[in-house]
Image: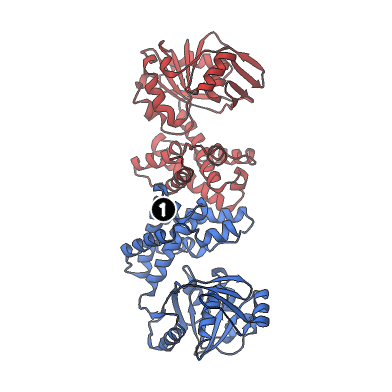
Chain colours: A red, B blue
């Protein structure tokens, strides 16, 4: 298969690196000049659980011309529309396009560029970091759950098999939407709150008022998720959040790293902001999500980011 | 008249100082030892628009024994119940008790200690500061609006007259509840938001997201105010807030000074928290006020203040 990784940050490099170990052809796509330059001149340096340098082709999205068998979308959420626009030329009849982006609402964006029969959605809990241009730091294990948009499991069986050859632990999941909501719930209750309060996950969950915030945001996510996905395992997701909060107690969530530590715009619009948007469509009020979205937007504006 | 000032911080000192210039006897009450000591040994030093040192009696609340004609309550909100408990001995049949505290819900507290026929509620926009124990800094002009709880204007006419002799600009107001809500609205939309976002009033009102926050909190205040007070001049209060925001654009509101600058517990429970409480009683949902109250509580907890 010819596989493009559209968005080759930390996670894109992990997928590109692991897939390059199989019988398939992998091409990285990205817009970060230093990153492209580094990988072209010195290869992709991998550190962490393995230490290795691999030669992988990388190009700007508009430079890709050969029709893809599979495109794995791993951009930042707000770069997705432009990426899809830029890679229109490599999306053919046989091309499958898989979104593994964090957050909500990406299938809606994809449908503006790709027919439903070509769309796959998924979620991954692999971790990855970048130590600099061309330097991926990969530790730990993870998994992928994915589904074909129209439920055509057979049409993507070879893709699941390829991921497993690459050791990426993929499972076809007839209810991947629940996994996507589970991950979004975890991020939606922890990310904006810890960012606004400037505290760790353990500090948030360790105060009564913090738990109230978590519970009220959670309730809105679940109400909207149920309207969108039908059955949702509310109890299971709550338990999952509580377990995550315990495991990651000393950590600041990624949005805190983005906004507070690195003064970068957040992905709030694809998390709590998306719940507000989806809630409005189905008539479910989401004042808590609205308020944390406004607070994060205000913080971004104060930092000159919007 | 024998007038006690129950709570002789900055504002209490202003009232004590100005009333001491009239024919009436004024006694300050407070629990701050250094403040009591300073005023007893060196008098109350006044700076600002006038420079003067005056001798004024000051005592701890439990030391006061003579029945009062008027008690002016000017404590911090969370000290009010204890103050009322401590001064029970000086509240007699002829005693009127006037609350000029910021925030909401104080009449309810007063009714646990004082009969309705003795209660007056009011609001003041005088300003005052303390430069240290026994040192009041008084600048600018202001006014007082007050009302007798049962609408018995005649029974408090002499008190209004006394305030005006002292230059305190008092007006009897048959709808003082609206003035109290107006002030609470201003504080309720600016105080927790600027505190959570760590920004000035101008910065808050200068962003679209900040204005959304203000508008959503305002709507809840108005809905609950209408349920409690009947007619409320919504348009007038909104205009008042916008004017205040322009005038005070470069300032941090008092709650920011309390929590962010001085790591002191805030009065959120008597502001947005009181709206949640009142809203629950009349069946009006107040998720935005609930959320900012939880955020401030969480911040207080993270600072070890609750």
Position of the C terminus of chain A, as image quadrant, is top left
- Judge by depth and name the residue closer to the eye, A16 or B89: A16
Q: Quadrant of residue A238?
A: top right
Query: Is residue B182 placed above or below B58 in the rendered structure?
Result: above
Whole-percent x and y of residue B261?
58, 58
Please tell me how crowded label 1 is: few (under 14), some (14-19), or many (20+) other residues with Cα within 10 Å.
Answer: many
Residue at mark 1: B205
Residue at x 34% of width, y 44% of height = A283
Whole-percent x and y of residue A270?
44, 36
Q: Quadrant of residue A23?
A: top right
**Residue A154 seen from this side:** no
Secondary-structure class at tag 1: helix
Q: Quadrant of residue A165?
A: top right
Q: Residue furthest top?
A: A23
Left or right of B222? Residue A38 is right
**Residue A184 seen from this side:** yes
Whole-percent x and y of residue A174?
45, 25
Q: Chain of mark 1?
A: B
Whole-percent x and y of residue A63?
42, 15
How many numbered circles are shown?
1
- Judge by depth and name the residue closer to the eye, B231 or B227: B231
Residue at x 44% of width, y 34% of height = A104
Left or right of A284? Residue B137 is right
Query: Is residue B50 placed above or below A135 in the rendered structure?
Result: below
Query: Is residue A52 placed above or below A75 in the rendered structure?
Result: above
Left or right of A73? Residue A55 is right
């Amino acid at each position: 298969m010819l596989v493009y990784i559209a968005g080759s940050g930390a996670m894109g490099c992990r997928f590109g690196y692991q897939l390059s170990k199989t019988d398939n052809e992998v091409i990285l796509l990205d817009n970060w000049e230093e990153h492209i330059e580094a990988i072209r001149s010195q290869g992709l340096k991998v550190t962490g659980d393995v230490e290795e340098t691999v030669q992988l082709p990388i190009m700007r999205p508009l430079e890709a011309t050969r029709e893809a068998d599979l495109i794995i979308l791993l951009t930042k959420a707000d770069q997705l529309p432009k990426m899809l626009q830029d890679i229109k030329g490599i999306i053919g009849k046989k091309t499958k396009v898989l979104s593994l982006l964090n957050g909500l609402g990406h299938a809606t964006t994809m449908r503006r560029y790709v027919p439903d029969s070509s769309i796959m959605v998924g979620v991954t809990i692999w971790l990855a970091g970048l130590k600099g241009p061309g330097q991926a730091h990969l530790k730990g294990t993870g998994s992928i759950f994915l589904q074909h948009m129209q439920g055509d499991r057979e049409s993507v069986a070879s893709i699941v098999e390829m991921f497993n050859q690459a050791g990426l632990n993929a499972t076809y999941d007839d209810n991947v939407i629940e996994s996507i909501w589970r991950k979004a719930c975890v991020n939606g209750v922890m990310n904006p709150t810890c960012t606004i309060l400037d505290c760790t996950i353990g500090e948030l969950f360790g105060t009564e008022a913090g738990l109230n915030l978590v519970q009220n945001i959670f309730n809105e996510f679940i109400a909207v998720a149920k309207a969108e996905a039908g059955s949702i395992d509310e109890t299971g997701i709550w338990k999952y959040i509580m377990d995550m909060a315990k495991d990651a107690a000393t950590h600041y969530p990624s949005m805190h790293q983005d906004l507070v530590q690195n003064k970068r715009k957040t992905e709030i619009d694809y998390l709590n902001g998306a719940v507000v948007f989806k809630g409005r469509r189905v008539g479910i009020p989401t004042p808590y999500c609205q308020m944390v979205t406004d607070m994060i937007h205000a913080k971004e504006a104060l930092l000159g980011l919007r």
